[in-house]
Amino acid sequence: MPHLLRQNIVLPAPPNVTLHDPRTHLRRLPPPYSVVQTPHNQVRDFAPQLRYQLELPMAHRLKLRPCKVIFVGDCAVGKTAIVNRFCYDKFQSNYKATIGVDFELENFKILGHNFSLEMWDTAGQERFKCIAGAYYRNASVVVATYDMSKRESLDSAKKWLSSALMYNTTQRPLVFLVGTKADLLSKEEFMSMERLASVAATQMHAEYWSVSARSGYRVTEFFQRLAALAFEAAAQQQLATLTKSAQGQVPQLSAKSQTFDLRSYFNNRFGKADTRQRSGCTC
Ligand SMILES: Nc1nc2c(ncn2[C@@H]2O[C@H](COP(=O)(O)OP(=O)(O)OP(=O)(O)O)[C@@H](O)[C@H]2O)c(=O)[nH]1
């Protein structure tokens, strides 16, 4: 368990944290690392409107496409290590540079819906930058990573984010700033680095997290949060599209009604039997 100091300051747990694997089922929005540092504004739970819509019978047929997550940052900051800690619960202390890009697919079940993350772990070495850029497009999430024991890598994280955003101009992805190797810092160093990183995160409009792939500190929590927020954004987007096309197909809405009721639409279109069948679902 992490040690709780003062209000919101959480220090890393010592190595040898036993990792569990609760990542596949998420029914509530996992809390952010720091409530103050939450530009993605959902702090405690999924948006009520989204929960309501996801209980609709039709919603259970939603097929969400995998969301693309890109990890960027200087070489050797620990991008591969956090992905491997989460996906395989393993940590390698010897450094093997990523060549170009590595890819992992992770499955989640969120609010009863299947959801996948495509994780693109890009190379930090300068010579691969031109190749990695090709993988930046259509990212739903950017994870700008820096090494908490190397101050300069925090400045670089901002530059990495800027290049990633250049390839994603139509829709701004969710952005996370992640400090790695928290296990290498003393309490004082950790707190001072977090203060600097919080300022940087605000400038980057990013949600901030400190993690350690070596000890496992906050790695699962971070990925759960990332998956939940990406899911929420993707589901909201798809339901909005569905609502729009449904509105196009419905002959007349009451002149008094300013909002379209997706629940009644699906009940009418797919019949009450379907609703009854689905109402037993505990998702
Ligand atoms: N102590 C400690 N070392 C870490 C941690 N995470 C990564 N490392 C070490 O840092 C080195 C680099 O880690 P990688 O994950 O390969 O770094 P990367 O950012 O993927 O590097 P590139 O592939 O070159 O972009 C390795 O030797 C890791 O063992 C951590 O949380 N704590």
Image: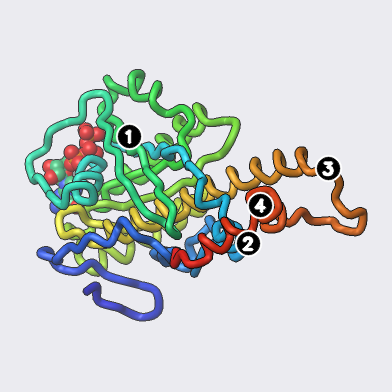
Q: Report which residue position mark 3 lands on.
A: 251
Residues at circles 4 and 3 in contact by the CB criterion of under 8 Å: no
Residue depth check, mark 1 versus mark 4: number of the one nearer the observer: 4
- How many C-alpha atoms fall within 10 Å of the one at disc 4: few (<14), some, or many (≥20)? some
Mark 4: amino acid:
Phe
Marks 2 and 3, how far apart at CA? 24 Å
Say which element carries label 4: helix
**Among the two numbered marks 1 and 2 on one chain, the one whose residue lies closer to the N terminus:** 2
Write the residue at 46% across / 46% down. Answer: 175
Residue depth check, mark 3 versus mark 1: number of the one nearer the observer: 3
Please identify the residue farthest to the right as the structure is shown: 255
Closer-to-camera residue (33/116): 116
Say which element carries label 2: helix
**Among the two numbered marks 3 and 1 on one chain, the one whose residue lies closer to the N terminus:** 1
Marks 1 and 2, how far apart at CA? 31 Å
Q: Report which residue position mark 4 lands on.
A: 266
Q: Position of residue 143 (x, y in %)?
A: 38, 44
Location of the C terminus by quadrant is: bottom left
Marks 3 and 1, how far apart at CA? 44 Å
Residues at circles 3 and 1 in contact by the CB criterion of under 8 Å: no
Q: Report which residue position mark 1 lands on.
A: 120
Write the residue at 63% across / 59% down. Answer: 272
Mark 2: amino acid:
Gln
- How many C-alpha atoms fall within 10 Å of the one at disc 1: few (<14), some, or many (≥20)? many
Residues at circles 1 and 4 in contact by the CB criterion of under 8 Å: no
Q: Report which residue position mark 2 lands on.
A: 49
**Among the two numbered marks 2 and 3 on one chain, the one whose residue lies closer to the N terminus:** 2
